[in-house]
Image (cartoon, rainbow, N blue to C red):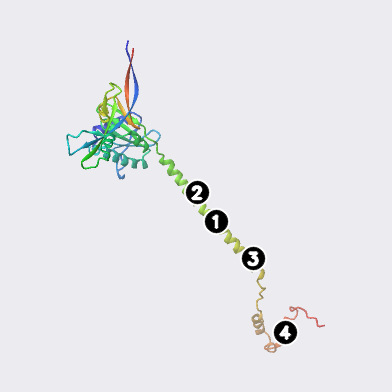
Amino acid sequence: MISSTEEKVKLYLMSKGMQPLSIDETLETEPNLSFNEANGSKVFVKIPSREELENRNAILSVILRATSFTRTANRVYIALPRTYAPMIDGAIIQEEGLGLIIYDEKTINEVIAPKFFEHQASSKSQENLDVAQEIEQLGSRISQLEQTVQTLRSEISQLKSIRPSVETPKTEKTETVRDGLPAFFRDNAWLDILSKRGREPERYVS
Amino acid sequence: MLAKAENLAHTSIRSIRLVVDVEDVFSPELTLEDFLKLHGKNPEPPKYRILNIEVVTCSEDNQPILVTECGRCPRFIRRFNGHVSCKKIITIE
């Protein structure tokens, strides 16, 4: 249920060009009002209830809790009744980056402007950092792979240079050939000697 | 002919710490400085209690008032850095 104070603050901020938004219920502590500015930034407003304004410490507690909204919203306001406003030094609110709206039955005024918290830019810069880290990791992995490929290439070339020339034995083939030959060729030791003739290096006897 | 202009007034807040004897109602209330001068010791509870009273001089009628009373004034704007800021109406002849 929207109270008259909430309605009053809502109308005041709408007159400043803000568009009301539905409140994100997933937040731990919900603001009373949520707005969208023309430039797309999000504005939260915390309106403490009478129970939350019992004494000075209670008001300080509300301020501390409202600072958590700065993680989600770009601007955060606290709306205090005029009678409670002199209890708290506005410098405390300003140091936290919050804005202050003071209201009574007749008037409503923004007396401290809130600080702008850049969330989108920060999230983008974080994304950029992540991408840069990923690229760096990929680059190092590629250089490692290049080194491995280079090592393998050199090893292969070394192996090629030291590989002995392997000749296929032709004894079986000769055997098969012999099968079709006459019987005096079988188990003839001269056939091997004569078949190697001409392939062996010439030996000169001095 | 009288003309009225609106200006801002920044009045500094004065904090007065008063020592109250809660066991003797006839004991005079002293400021903390006077109590220390008179008794030569700190006001220890539960006999003594220190109250902090914040006062300002109203920019409109120059009368001393409590800072909390400023909240009832329509000219009050804000309390900031130990000062009370409020609207001051200047009459120009």
Circles 2 and 4, Cβ within 8 Å, touching? The answer is no
Circle 4: element type: helix
The amino acid on which the numbered mark 2 sits, given as a three-letter code, is: Ala
**Mark 2, other Cα within 10 Å: few <14 / some 14–19 / many ≥20:** few
Residue B66: image location, x then y, percent: 26, 29
Circles 4 and 1, Cβ within 8 Å, touching? The answer is no
User: Where residue A193 is drawn, which disc sits there?
Assistant: 4
Q: Is residue A49 above or below residue B74?
A: below
**Mark 3, other Cα within 10 Å: few <14 / some 14–19 / many ≥20:** few
Which residue is identified by label 3? A157
Which residue is identified by label 2? A132
Which residue is identified by label 1? A142
Of callouts 1 and 2, the N-terminal one: 2
Instruction: Give the chain of mark 4.
Output: A
Of callouts 4 and 1, the N-terminal one: 1
CA–CA distance in space, label 4 to label 1: 59 Å
Q: Nearer the viewer, mark 1 or mark 2?
A: 2
Circle 2: element type: helix
**Mark 1, other Cα within 10 Å: few <14 / some 14–19 / many ≥20:** few
User: In the rendered view of the protein, which quadrant contains the N terminus of chain A?
Assistant: top left
How many numbered marks does the figure carry? Answer: 4
User: In the rendered view of the protein, which quadrant contains the C terminus of chain A?
Assistant: bottom right
Pick out the residue farthest to the top.
B1
Q: Is residue B1 left or right of residue A50?
A: right
Q: Where, by quadrant of the figure, is residue B58 drawn? A: top left
Instruction: Give the chain of mark 3.
Output: A
Say if labels 1 and 2 share a chain.
yes
